[in-house]
């Protein structure tokens, strides 16, 4: 099963041959585990590179100097494990927090096989978020509305961590809702994989206005 976008995406990303091979290994693992773990939408398996790999790689480009990342609700490792694989040669390390033990098994095994600098933690976000003070970037994809993401990541975003949160066409509505509870400094970066999507880049967060 081949993805016609693979060659284009690899060329545009400028990754090494070794990194391309590690990404291929991730894709093979995803397809191998999918029937058992239901890691991603089945229809996206034929478009893994355009729907998942490239979507994750664009985050790496938005924080080229970042070395420590935290991925919340990692699931199939999108974007966290892909970031760890693609960023390995520049010293990127990613902590993957996932509450589903079966998905953690996939993440752990695939991180080992690809040599990614990724640490998997089977835990609920609210129970462990305080352990990641000083992380350069926190990210999450298809996990929760912005208001909830900000509630979870407040301890990090208030102290200098950058938030990168891919969102769909309802991003403005989510930001409006979040703005009723938070004073947030952010900008919207157009997604290169979906013209309707945006990446919310949060650079500062103040406590909820009612506190």
Image (cartoon, rainbow, N blue to C red):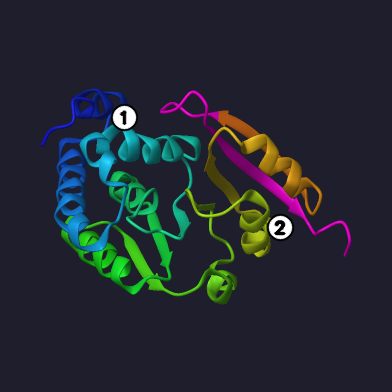
Pick the front one: 30 or 16 = 30
Residue at 54% across, 67% down = 132
Q: Position of residue 39 (x, y in %)?
A: 30, 56
Which portion, as a residue range, is magenta?
190-211
Q: CA distance from mark 1 to mark 2?
A: 31 Å
Tell me, yes or no, whether the highlighted magenta stretch contains residue 208.
Answer: yes
**Position of residue 202 in the picture relative to residue 9 (left or right):** right
Q: Is residue 184 visible?
A: no
Q: Position of residue 109 (x, y in %)?
A: 20, 65
Residue holding disc 2: 158
Label 1 or label 2, whichever comes before in sequence order? 1
In the picture, the quarter occupied by the C terminus is bottom right
Residue at 45% across, 27% down = 194
Q: Residues within 10 Å of mark 2 (few under 14, many from 20)?
A: some
In the picture, the quarter occupied by the N terminus is top left
Q: Is residue 118 visible?
A: yes
**SS for dot 2:** loop
Tell me, yes or no, whether the highlighted magenta stretch contains residue 79.
Answer: no
Instruction: Tell me: residue 140, above or below residue 151.
Output: above
Residue holding disc 1: 13
**Position of residue 156 in the picture relative to residue 185 (left or right):** left
Instruction: Tell me: residue 49, above or below residue 190.
Output: below
* CB-based contact (under 8 Å), mark 1 and mark 2: no
Q: Quadrant of residue 203?
A: top right
**Position of residue 121 in the picture relative to residue 146 (left or right):** left
Q: Residues within 10 Å of mark 1 (few under 14, many from 20)?
A: some
Q: Quadrant of residue 151?
A: bottom right
Name the mark on residue 93.
none
Residue at 28% across, 63% down = 107
Instruction: Tell me: residue 83, above or below residue 5.
Output: below
């Amino acid at each position: 099963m081949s993805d016609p976008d693979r060659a284009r995406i690899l060329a545009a990303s400028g990754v090494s041959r070794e990194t391309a091979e590690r990404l291929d290994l991730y894709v093979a693992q995803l397809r191998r585990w999918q029937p058992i773990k239901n890691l991603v939408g089945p229809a996206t398996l034929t478009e893994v590179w355009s729907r998942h790999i490239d979507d994750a790689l664009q985050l790496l480009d938005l924080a080229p100097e970042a070395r420590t990342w935290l991925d919340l609700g990692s699931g199939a490792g999108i974007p966290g494990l892909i970031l760890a694989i693609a960023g390995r040669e520049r010293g990127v390390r990613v902590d993957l927090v996932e509450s589903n033990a079966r998905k953690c098994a996939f993440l752990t095994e695939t991180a080992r096989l690809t040599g990614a600098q990724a640490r998997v933690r089977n835990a609920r976000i609210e129970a462990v978020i305080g352990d990641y003070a000083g992380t350069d970037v926190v990210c999450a994809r298809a996990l929760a509305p912005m208001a909830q993401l900000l509630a979870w990541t407040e301890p990090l975003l208030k102290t200098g961590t950058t938030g990168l949160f891919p969102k769909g066409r309802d991003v403005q509505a989510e930001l409006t809702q979040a703005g009723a509870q938070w004073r947030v400094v952010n900008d919207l970066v157009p997604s290169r994989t979906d013209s309707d999507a945006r990446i919310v880049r949060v650079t500062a967060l103040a406590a909820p206005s009612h506190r």
